Image: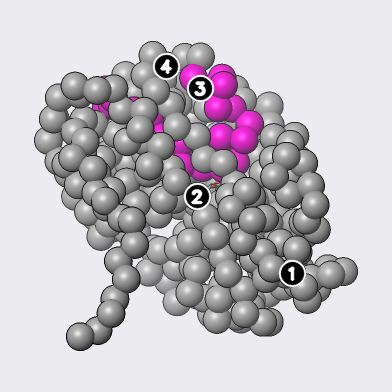
Amino acid sequence: MTDFQFTNFAPSPARGRVLVFDSGVGGLTVAEEIRALGPALGVHYAADSGFFPYGDKSDEALQERLPRVAKLLCDHVRPDVFVIACNTASTLALEDIRAVLDIPVVGTVPAIKPAAAFSETGTIGLLATPGTIRRAYTARLINEFAGDRRVIMHGSIELVRLAEAHARGDDVPIEAIAAAQAPLFEAPGGDQIDTVVLACTHFPLVRGQLIASAPHGVSYVDSGAAIARQTIRVLPPETEARGIGGSAYLTSPPEESPDLALVLRRYGFPDVHLVALDPIAMTSAPIAL
Ligand code: DGL
């Protein structure tokens, strides 16, 4: 008989409503992990499509917008837990968002700790948005968990766009993925990287292409499974079942991005609604850095 090893994956019977939030479709990678671990949960999804991408916005613009968007979405969806499935937002505004919500909030922390522990060469890569790369929060994580490791960082909005395009069904050439991650491996010591932290929730969408286009064998780690476990851990006990399945919410009219609505449907969010943020829409133009 084949000796498969099914390691400690134990789905939880937890019930309740979870709202997973990102700028675009990256958080779908986290929503999938939450659904797999908590099949009786109602998992809803919100994308701040009116302000995508976050990774090239100024800290001030994001700090101003994120608590307001989070509050509006939660007032609308009434979740039991709010999951910020976005490194760029969490590393900047987790506390500001917590301050305006009265439910547990789970943030996304780059998986630097497991990557540092896993690496055999002692050199790890950190692939993220430019915003996440420059955060003090990220620097603190590196100091705390990878102080004895060499950490090579690269921030790429291009890779966010490629992952989003791939999810929307575009034919993204693997050469483009290779070029977007190449600076990691071309940096001094980059040939020693054996583990890369995918510190943007969009990037697991193209994990296969990243592996296939790396210059040598590299493991890519992300936080999705850990976020799912934490979501279930913080769900208040005795939370009522409020239906499985879920809807999706956008901050720009769904009819303006039919391909985005289609991705959401493909991922199991059949209804896509607009949550209008009119005053916020006024500030939605990208801010030059
Ligand atoms: N998915 C987001 C993250 O984890 C950011 C993508 C973006 O909007 O730039 O950082």
Dividing the picture into quarters, in which one does residue 259 lie?
Answer: bottom left
Q: Is mark 3 within 8 Å of ligand 1?
A: no
Q: Quadrant of the C terminus?
A: top right
> Which residue corresponds to the image point at 19% horizontal and 47% vertical from the top-left?
39
Q: Nearer the viewer, mark 1 or mark 4?
A: 1
Mark 4 nearby-residue class (10 Å; few <14, some 14–19, many ≥20):
some
Q: Is mark 4 within 8 Å of ligand 1?
A: no
Q: Give the alpha-carbon distance from disc 3 to disc 1, as whole Å.
A: 38 Å
Q: Position of residue 8 (x, y in %)?
A: 33, 56
User: Does the stretch in magenta take in 222?
Assistant: no
Left or right relative to 122: residue 244? left
Would you place residue 128 above or below residue 135 in this image? below
Q: Which residue, given by chain and number where applicable, does mark 3 sit on?
A: 97
- Name the kind of residue labelled 4 in the image: Leu
Residue found at the far right of this picture: 188
Q: Position of residue 89 (x, y in %)?
A: 56, 36
State the mark number for residue 121.
Answer: 1
The disc, 1 or 2, on the residue closer to the chain's N-terminal end is 1
SS at badge 4: loop
- Name the kind of residue labelled 3 in the image: Ile
Q: Which residue, given by chain and number where applicable, does mark 2 sit on?
A: 223
Would you place residue 123 above or below residue 288 in this image? below
State if disc 3 and disc 4 touch (CB < 8 Å).
Answer: yes
State if disc 2 and disc 1 touch (CB < 8 Å).
Answer: no
User: Does the stretch in magenta take in 94?
Assistant: yes
Q: Give the alpha-carbon distance from disc 2 to disc 3, as whole Å.
A: 20 Å
State the mark number for residue 101.
Answer: 4
Q: 130 or 277: which is nearer to us? A: 130
Mark 2 nearby-residue class (10 Å; few <14, some 14–19, many ≥20):
many
Q: Give the alpha-carbon distance from disc 2 to disc 4, as whole Å.
A: 23 Å
Q: Position of residue 86 (x, y in %)?
A: 51, 42
